[in-house]
Image (cartoon, rainbow, N blue to C red):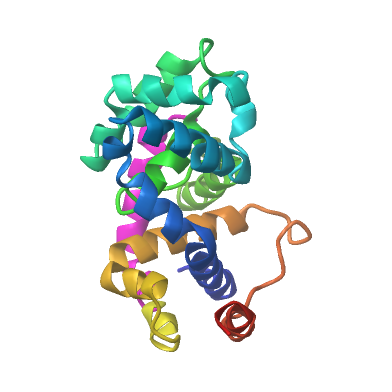
Amino acid sequence: MLDQSLLRNATNEAIYWWQRDEYFYHKIFSNIEEIVKESTQIEFFTDYLFKTFARQYSVHRTLKDFNNNALNILEFLNSENFFNLVLKNQTNIIDKTANKMKGSLANGKPVSFLSKMAFLINPKDFSLYDKYARNSMNLILKSKVSGKKKAIDKTYDQFISKINVELEENESELMSQLKTLHNLPQKIETSYFENNPRIFIRRIYDKYLWLLSQDRNERRNSLDIITQQKFWNYYES
């Protein structure tokens, strides 16, 4: 059973960030195959969206000489058919690409970077990977198997397969959070979640994992829906 307080907080976080940034990123990133075909589009995307995304999601530090190398990274990903395979739900492309980028384009294996980009392209099948999510998954899995010291390694394949199992096991509790969306004014971002509940519950679980392994003092204050709505009123008025 999921921690209900954390689940509510994760739901509110998922809605807030999807409404603030992620829906916009997703609508652009999901068309990246078309963007990379034209030089002016890919240059604009690189300078105004890709660089901003990488810094906002704190993954630019894992990429070598990122500011000067950003376009090369995108061209490499395109040459590896990364975007197409992400759209086709091929989750094993994360580890394969991370191994190829290590040393030449990245400091170590940029699994976190690739997972976050893949999530924005295809949020139905890809979850965000970072140290908090991995540590939380280890905590959950080790609680089920006594005496096991380590539940998963640092590969995305193992991580995403475990998450998919957890999503199935906790589906009822996660789906119950749809009621939160029903109480919100109809907007394009929240309507997208209502029309795509599998994306919604995956994003909630991502946020749940992000919160779980953090020390209570590290976590942001719980962001309730009423406060969120009051906040968006400033933007909408």
* Whether residue 153 can be seen here: no
Q: Quadrant of residue 191?
A: bottom left
**Left or right: where does residue 132 sit relative to residue 33?**
right
Say whether residue 212 is magenta: no
Residue depicted at x 44% and y 89%: 183
**Left or right: where does residue 125 sit relative to residue 10?**
left
Pick the quarter of the image with the N terminus.
Answer: bottom left
Q: Where is residue 153 shown, x and y percent of the image?
A: 48, 30
Residue depicted at x 26% and y 25%: 81
Q: Where is residue 134 shown, x and y percent of the image?
A: 53, 42
Q: Quadrant of residue 220?
A: bottom right
Residue found farthest to the left: 88
Of 175 and 35, which appears nearest the observer?
A: 35
Of 88 and 32, which appears nearest the observer?
A: 32
Of 210 and 19, which appears nearest the observer?
A: 19
| Stretch of the chain drawn in magenta | 152-176
Residue depicted at x 64% and y 81%: 234
Pick the quarter of the image with the C terminus.
Answer: bottom right
Give the main secondary structure, helix, strand or loop, of the magenta stretch.
helix
Residue 69's place in the image compared with 87, above or below, is: above
Residue found farthest to the right: 217
**Left or right: where does residue 144 sit relative to residue 200?**
right
Q: Quadrant of residue 64?
A: top right
Q: Where is residue 6 shown, x and y percent of the image?
A: 58, 69
Residue found farthest to the top: 104
